[in-house]
């Protein structure tokens, strides 16, 4: 019985890693959400400033909950709380380039 999850073979993973590498992006493989969350958290230093866009995947694996623990400076909640639309846009753009 299939779990419905996409299973990529080693050859496809190598092709994806190579294509992403050309763009300066590294590919990490995780067996499940728990492992994905652990790998992600290992790559972000404690106290780091973190800004994110919307992501159903990050939400599903618990990353937003992890950001809310205080281990990181999570910028998004403060930015989304800004009432003035122009100021919110400016703050969002500024957060992405720091």
Image: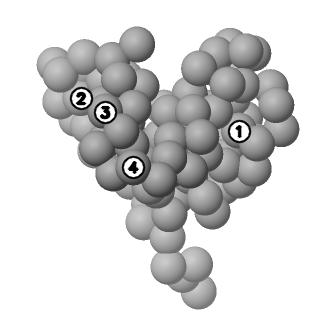
Mark 2 or 1 closer to N-term? 2
Rounded to the nearest whole Å, what is the CA distance between mark 3 and mark 4? 10 Å
Mark 2 or 4 closer to N-term? 2
Where 95 sits versus 81, above or below?
above
Q: Is residue 24 left or right of residue 84?
A: left
Mark 3 or 4 closer to N-term? 4
Residue 84's label in the rendered image is 4
Rounded to the nearest whole Å, what is the CA distance between mark 3 and mark 1? 22 Å
The answer to whether residue 72 of the structure is visible from this angle is: yes
Rounded to the nearest whole Å, what is the CA distance between mark 4 and mark 1? 24 Å
Residue that label 3 marks: 90
Q: Is residue 72 left or right of residue 50?
A: right
Local SS, label 4: loop
Where 49 sits versus 84, above or below?
above
Mark 3 or 1 closer to N-term? 1
Residue that label 1 marks: 67
Furthest residue to the bottom? 1
- Which residue is pictured at 80% across the width and 25% down the height? 71
Rounded to the nearest whole Å, what is the CA distance between mark 2 and mark 3? 30 Å
Q: Is residue 79 left or right of residue 27?
A: right
């Amino acid at each position: 019985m299939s779990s419905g999850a996409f299973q990529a073979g080693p050859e496809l993973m190598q092709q994806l890693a190579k294509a992403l590498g050309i763009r300066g992006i590294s590919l990490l493989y995780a067996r499940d959400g728990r492992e994905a969350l652990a790998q992600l958290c290992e790559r972000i230093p404690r106290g780091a400033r973190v800004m994110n866009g919307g992501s159903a995947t990050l939400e599903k694996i618990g990353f937003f909950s992890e950001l809310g623990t205080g281990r990181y400076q999570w910028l998004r909640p403060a930015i989304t709380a800004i009432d003035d639309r122009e100021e919110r846009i400016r703050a969002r753009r500024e957060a992405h380039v720091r």
